[in-house]
Image (spheres, grey):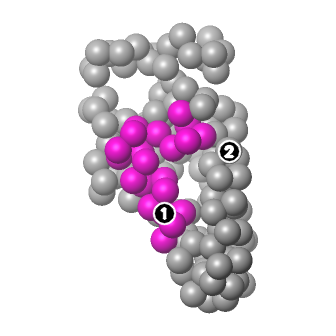
């Protein structure tokens, strides 16, 4: 499927390439989290701060650049259902699950459950829209001609 509403050609992005982009983003955020932890300690204040940083990283970059660093490397971008750049509200809705990991004790389990649910919904949706995309009214596309483009 192609999207030409913004003047460029794109194709829908399936879960494997999206997962690779998220892992790249996780490495970036892990380094930021470690640096912040060394500066302020790894206490509850660090946990709250890193939750805000993670949510802001994904939401702000999706709005301003259309992609996080990992998505840019993989040739992905987040767009609204209308084919245009996503709004901040949609980006926050789409990325809200990222703060689950910051919930004390249960967070890692909730985050894992959310990741699995997102992957299952991406795989089962003909437009590769995960539950987070469906709730936010977004989709992830790949630039045609980018080296990451499989088909």
Return the residue found at the far bottom: 44
In primary-sequence order, the first of circles 1 and 2 is: 2
Percent from the top left, x then y, of residue 92?
A: 39, 59
Quarter of the figure with residue 139:
top left
Return the residue found at the far front: 39
- Whether residue 102 is situated above or below residue 32 in the rendered picture: below
Instruction: State the SS at label 2.
Output: helix
Percent from the top left, x then y, of residue 142?
A: 51, 24
Compare residues 149 and 24 and report the one nearer the observer.
24
Report the Cα–Cα distance between label 1 and label 2. 15 Å
Q: Residue at x 44, y 61 (%)?
A: 56
Indicate the quadrant containing the N terminus: top left, top right, bottom left or bottom right: top left
Indicate the quadrant containing the C terminus: top left, top right, bottom left or bottom right: top right
User: Which disc, if any, is residue 55?
Assistant: 1
Q: Which residues are magenta?
A: 52-72
- Whether residue 51 is situated above or below residue 58 in the rendered picture: below
Q: Residue at x 42, y 54 (%)?
A: 59
User: Which disc, if any, is residue 24?
Assistant: 2
Judge whether residue 121 can be spotted in this image: yes
Q: Residue at x 31, y 37 (%)?
A: 85
Q: Residue at x 71, y 69 (%)?
A: 34
């Amino acid at each position: 499927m192609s999207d030409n509403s913004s003047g460029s050609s794109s194709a829908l992005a399936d879960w494997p390439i999206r997962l690779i982009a998220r892992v790249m983003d996780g490495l970036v955020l892990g380094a930021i989290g470690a640096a912040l932890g060394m500066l302020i300690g790894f206490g509850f204040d660090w946990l709250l701060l890193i939750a805000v940083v993670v949510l802001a990283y994904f939401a702000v970059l999706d709005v301003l650049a259309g992609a996080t660093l990992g998505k840019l490397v993989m040739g992905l971008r987040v767009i609204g259902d209308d084919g245009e750049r996503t709004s901040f509200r949609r980006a926050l809705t789409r990325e809200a699950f990222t703060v689950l990991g910051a919930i004390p004790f249960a967070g890692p389990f909730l985050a894992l459950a959310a990741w699995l649910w997102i992957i299952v919904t991406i795989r089962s949706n003909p437009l590769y829209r995960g539950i987070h995309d469906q709730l936010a009214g977004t989709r992830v596309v790949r630039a045609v001609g980018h080296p990451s483009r499989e088909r």
